[in-house]
Image: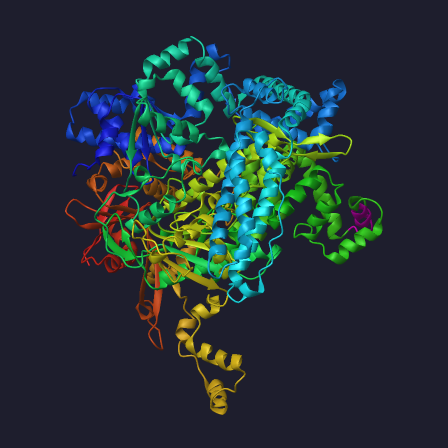
Amino acid sequence: MTAKKWTASQQQAIDQREGPILVAAAAGSGKTAVLVERIIQQLVNGELEITDILVVTFTNAAAAEMRQRISKGLENELKKRPNSPLLRRQLNLLPRASISTLHAFCKSVLQTYYYEAGVDPRFRLLDQTEAQLTEDEVMEELFEDAYRDDDRFYRLVDYFTGDKDDEALKRLILDLYHFSRANPYPEQWLTNMVDVYRSDSGNPEWLDDARQFVKDRFQSLHGLYERMMVLCRDEDGPRAYLPVLEEEAAAIDRILAAADRESMRLLASPSFKRLPAVKKADKELLDADKQNVVKSGRDTVKDEWKKIYEQFLKEETEFVLDDMAAAGPLLELLAEYTESFAERYEARKRSVNVLDFHDLEHYCLKLFGEETDAVRSYQRRFKEVLVDEYQDTNFVQEELLLRIASADSMFMVGDVKQSIYRFRLAEPGLFLSKFHRYEKEGAGTRIDLAANFRSRHEILGAVNDLFRKLMSERLGELDYDERSFLRQGSADQLNLDQMEPELVMCSREGDGDEEDAEAARLEARAAAVKIRRMIDSGFMIADKELGVQRPIRYSDIAVLMRSMPWAETYVEEFSLYNVPLYADLSTGYFDAVEIRVMLSLLQIIDNPYQDIPLASVLRSPIGGLDEEELALIRGCYPEGSFFTALKIYAGRYTDSRAASFITELKNWRSDAVEKSLASFIWQLYNDTGYLEYCGGLPGGRQRRANLTALYDRAVQYEATSFRGLFRFLRFIERMKERGEDLGKAGAAGESEDVVRLMTVHKSKGLEFPVVILAGLNKGFNFQDLNQAYLKHKEMGLAVRLIDPERRTSYPTLFYYVMREKLRREQLAEEMRVLYVSMTRAEQKLICTLSVNDTEKAVDAWKMSVEGSRVSEASLLRSGSPADWLVPVLMTYRDNLTQFAPEAPLHEAESGTRWIISVESVQTLPAPETENGDEERKKLLQYVRKLEPFAEPEKAIQDLLEWQYSHTAAVRTPVKHSVTELKRMQEPDPYARRITGDVQELVEKPSFASAEKRSGADTGTAVHTVMQFIHYADFDKDSIKREIERLVQEEKLTKAEADAVPPEWIERFFNSDTGLSLKKAKHVYRELPFNISIPASTFYPDWTGPEENLFIQGIIDCVYQNENGEWVILDYKTDRAHDAESLRERYRFQLKMYQQALEEAWGLNRTEAVIIAMRTGERIRLEDK
């Protein structure tokens, strides 16, 4: 195996020891590989032991991958030096190494030093469900006591809530509680929040921010004036307007030169003259378009000027501060109740011995803040602290790390351009501070990894060209300069066609409520058509592992969105074009009909006197009543509850379905008290047959998955300290009130050959050959900036003030300043989200957006372009990613095709060429047309033109006498799996099916069945292990750990894991074949394939024209051995078959695998091998 070649920067990051070290690792720069190699080299050289290092990752999956990579690296080194006791010791110590998330590390600290932390070592971590329920109960108790004992509390309720209830105040207190816990000193943060409102706070810093924001916005207006004056000075421009515009521009100059806010306020009072009329003599030369642009621009200026004045300058500074001081006592009371909630919540958790994730960090912070055994122990132990994804840490985590690590032992890796977790209170400023200080002040070492080993040069050029004109320290919090550019990391790229980035602009119809739905449908259709054409045309991409070209597969493509509201539309539209799509939906669960029915049933079991849920259940297949019967029931008791009416009706008609339902309901209400919630829900599925019923409906697989997820959710709920149906329903109701959703249960596997649709956040850390970035004209979500209160990590809390006499509320200057600050921070985050999304693409990037009127949209975007740049003012005003992307592309007009805004030509630095197209409902083929036949198209032309058909008599005669020439094909499925065809080769396939194992359609949960798992279950579980196991030198214990890892990563259930005999896996990997597989450079597991073969091959009685069958399948494993030969492995767990029987039984299947692989990859021959997992036997199929 050849040694990996590192770039100079990578080698520096591996070798440099003197810290602190910050590695700024660009997208695709191999940061994880560098991190692992640094650790390996220090272990190999004897500088450190693995237990001397703390490795902090962002996710559990990342920690597991890091541990596995280190293990593999040590094993590779051990092969070079098999007698090294040092390496063997490090491998043995690896299970004890501190490689985890910071939360997991904190948990281990508290369990070790519980006596100093003051916690019970048997504490349990709250999950999100239990935490929310506990918070709700504590808040209810707090409010009850406050209403009873504290008259001041009524002022607080009156100030922060509406007329209906006090939920707004509860949310505010909870919000402040969680927000303050992202600070190392939450009580101090709350104190500072109140101090801002004190009258003796002097000249606050935020007034300086207010002045700067005013200057920025007037500066942007000045830029608009300059562009308007240029038009006025043109020969055919509206010259009459020039004096007025010059006068107003001069007024802005005076405002910008003002020394303080008060001076600005006096100068900026808006007063505008009417634009003079254009003289008759000048009208002949006047360009009406230029005149309209100037008039429209000035209207924009006037509106913006007035807005700036109203928000930032109208009130005198003295009055502004007095208003804030008046609200100070209320803010102090709010902080008091937030702290009171924190104390009560803490006491409740201690009473049941539970902690939440905040507690893990804050207990450790307190423990490490004193001279304790714990802090001394960790300071002595950790010689190096490595932090992955450092850009996503927060203030608390930073403080924790600094208390156990010396400055020179810190090694931090990340990319601030990929910090997209602001909503989780990540603080990119921590990274940025070191990024600048280490370079300028020499406080540490900064190493930039700019070489990208993921993407083609077209992608890198597109990203660099865009962000060099977007991202700056003022907007984006970082200058995207030469040192930030992505550089080509690998030179051996294949020469492929049509890899230019594309922008598809969809011109939509409709407005108002229909606008968003039409945009989603049109973009989804454009994406589906694009994918359909790529698949059908055999669009070629590079196979990175093999270094060859191959046709694209669905699984090579990902559709990325900022959020998922359009996901359902994409699923629907893609299905119309026969494009398989996997979407891990995070919404829609509670709206699913089957879930609504089951929740209604649970509601009436808890309390039958609920009319709407009762009617819902009775009308459903569970009740089986129709509308007429429901009307008869209501007629029995028109004014009272529907349940009373139902009982009256059932008493009159004792043999009715209504009477049977009341009996069942009575039994269920009794069972609900005696049984656990989860087992009771499964009993309802069995008693009603509802699970099986839903499974037989259209979309049955998804419906069953949803219902099973409800059972799973009940299991999770009962793992908490809460019990009972009422509390479960209350929790579900709270989730719905808060707009939270469980997400539809997954009914399709991510590993299948499907297009994947996901959010940009879900895609982080992943890469795809082709990325379709959708919805770029969908507006940024600034909804949080219009709430009654705003929060900021440094500024505190901004509230609207209330005029008690007028009963109105109004924002303060402080509120507007905080809102502007938050808006800019959000724009910086959105810019980083765009960067992350574009850098997921390896080979092809396609961006889609939709507009109502393409021409008008282009004209609006042109106003943002100033020669070879986009104005900063326009960037700050942007409402969507499209407002950034399109104007930047306009500055590179000579590098575009099919796009012609009238702007100056400018040379794009990278030479990357974008292909831009405009699509609409008319230009996109409908699903039928896309796959229709030519004759049908020809007939449709006659219909559209209202012309008679050519030769009508002959056409009618032909139609009457026509016979379909492919009758055999009609009787034959067009698509087969290899397994189906294998069964067709057997003597009597139906006999096998009848006498073989018959499994239940719906698998029973473990509590309902004591039966052993079938052989098929074991086979499935073994195949899953072989698909995901990390190759290494295994013994039985290490295999058990690998299986446990797969359970933790939810690739196996616990029951499936128990069905896997570890000795089978161990025996295989220690066999000659297993050893060869571990050494292989190229390995493909669960490799899907498609192949087309003549139908007569499998149907001897075939008549008529020859047809091809479409065969699909999945090969367990394909690898290239040390001799360069390709080997197919097929794992079998069959019982009691000798080698010859297995060979004959699966001969046809393996032959198909060989044919598919050889045709697809252009191979002369392959070797096919059956691995009998039960016996360990290697059964070789003869060569073709």
Residue 619 visible, this orientation: yes
Quarter of the rendering occupied by the N terminus: top left
Q: Residue at horizontal 29%, vertical 33%?
A: 448
Classify residue 66 by image quadrant.
top left
Describe residue 902's horizontal placement relative to residue 163 as left or right: left
**What residue sits 34% from the left and 64% below the top?**
537
Extreme residue toward the front, this view:
281
State which region is magenta.
Answer: 645-654
Name the residue nearer the viewer: 1032 or 181.
181
How was the colour assigned to the protein in this rendering? Answer: rainbow
Q: Can residue 650 be found in the magenta stretch?
A: yes
Residue 411: % across, % down: 32, 25
Q: Nearer the viewer, residue 870 or 915?
A: 870
Residue 720: x %, y % from top left: 56, 28
The quarter of the picture where the C terminus appears is bottom left
- Residue 1058 vs 909, above or below: the answer is above
- Height in image: 572 above or below 403? below
Q: Is residue 159 magenta?
A: no
Per the picture, the main secondary structure of the magenta-coloured stretch is: helix
Q: Nearer the viewer, residue 395 or 725?
A: 395
The percent position of residue 150, horizontal first and vertical second, equals 74, 18
Residue 163 x, y percent position in the rendering: 75, 35
- Left or right: residue 387 compared with residue 678: left
Q: How many marks?
A: 0
Give the vertical position of 134 relative to 840 (above or below). Answer: above
Q: Closest to the observer: 375 or 860?
A: 860
Answer yes or no: is residue 775 visible. Answer: no
